[in-house]
Image (cartoon, rainbow, N blue to C red):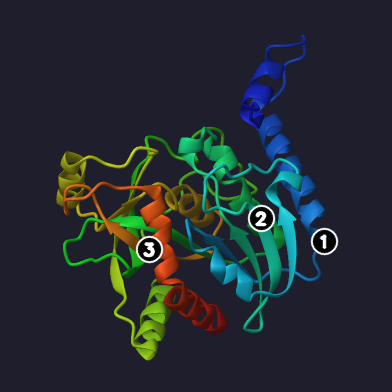
Amino acid sequence: MPFGPEFIVSTLCLCGDKPFNLKTKMEDTINRQLDEAAAFVEERISGKPEMAVVLGSGLGPLAELIKNPVRISYADIPHFAVSTVSGHAGELIYGDLNGRRIICMNGRVHYYEGYSFARITFPTKLFKRLGVKTLILTNAVGGINLDFAAGDLMIVTDHINMLGGNPLIGQNNDKLGPRFPDMSEVYSRRLQELARTTGKQMGLDLKSGVFVALSGPSYETPAEIRMLRMLGADAVGMSVVPEAIIANHMGLEILAISCVTNAAAGIEDQKLSHEDVKETAAQITERFTNLMSLIIEQI
């Protein structure tokens, strides 16, 4: 696995006889990488994206609605991690959706793939550098709330981070945000209300709830699901939280919509599989894409 900038900078500190400021050098490294990635993307698009959308497992069809798309493979973007998971296409798509300039991340990378939090959240930092002000996160989740059913869409109102780490650990990059960011409203109440109103107009029964992130890649045990329910979680998954923490740190307005693809372990007498997750996501494609399109149009 390629070493990240943290390792490189730490190694450099041990070489040579001239001391330097580790914090400054690390910031310089990360900011230089962001500049290089931003320059690469900007050479291939026209204008600045107003908002960014991250599409989770099986939710890629929304990207097909983008007009005049410019597609950029993750593998071609400097310092960008490549998705290794089925159901994640691994490309940035820039274009027009309902009159709004958006950049869409068709598939994401996850902690369980072996990437550091710094690499997982690099795309989010890149969006900020490109001029994005609003971030929409989507993912596939297991329903913990007993009132949820497969196929439901849930507006994320808050989250519980059980990934075992935080992407802000380490030296703070003052150019991105403050050392101790407030987390009392990670997910914009304004955008939550907009999503609810849009859902009602479409006749959709949108759920709302607290999302909990675990590292994966194994699904949770029934005992873990019982514990998570007692903690106040309504749905569980393996993404969103690192991106949300970094986006909040940088002052982006965030909306997160989760697709409930299955009941979490122990609720129903059936085994869980990634293929079933993708199949359920595919079944609600039309509802999901219509909802997201209207939300994007109104933001």
Q: CA distance from mark 2 to mark 3?
A: 22 Å
Q: Which is nearer the eye, 271 or 262?
A: 271
Disc nearer the start of the sequence (2/1): 1
Q: Is residue 188 visible?
A: no
Q: x, y (%) of residue 236?
A: 31, 52
Which label is found at residue 116? Answer: none
Q: Residue at x 65, y 28 (%)?
A: 2
Q: Residue at x 72, y 35 (%)?
A: 29
Q: Residue furthest top?
A: 17
Question: Relative to 188, is 147 on the left or the right?
Answer: left
Q: Residue at x 56, y 83 (%)?
A: 297
Q: CA distance from mark 2 to mark 1?
A: 13 Å
User: Mark 1: which secondary structure?
Assistant: loop
Q: Badge 1 is on which residue?
A: 44
Q: Badge 2 is on which residue?
A: 91
Q: Badge 3 is on which residue?
A: 280
User: Mark 3: which secondary structure?
Assistant: helix
What amino acid is at disc 3?
Thr
Q: x, y (%) of residue 208?
A: 29, 69
Tell which tag, 2 or 1, sits nearer the viewer: 2
What amino acid is at disc 2?
Glu
Q: Which is nearer the eye, 58 or 22?
A: 58
* Quadrant in the picture for residue 145: bottom left
Q: Is residue 81 above or below residue 258?
A: above
Q: Is residue 62 above or below residue 268?
A: below
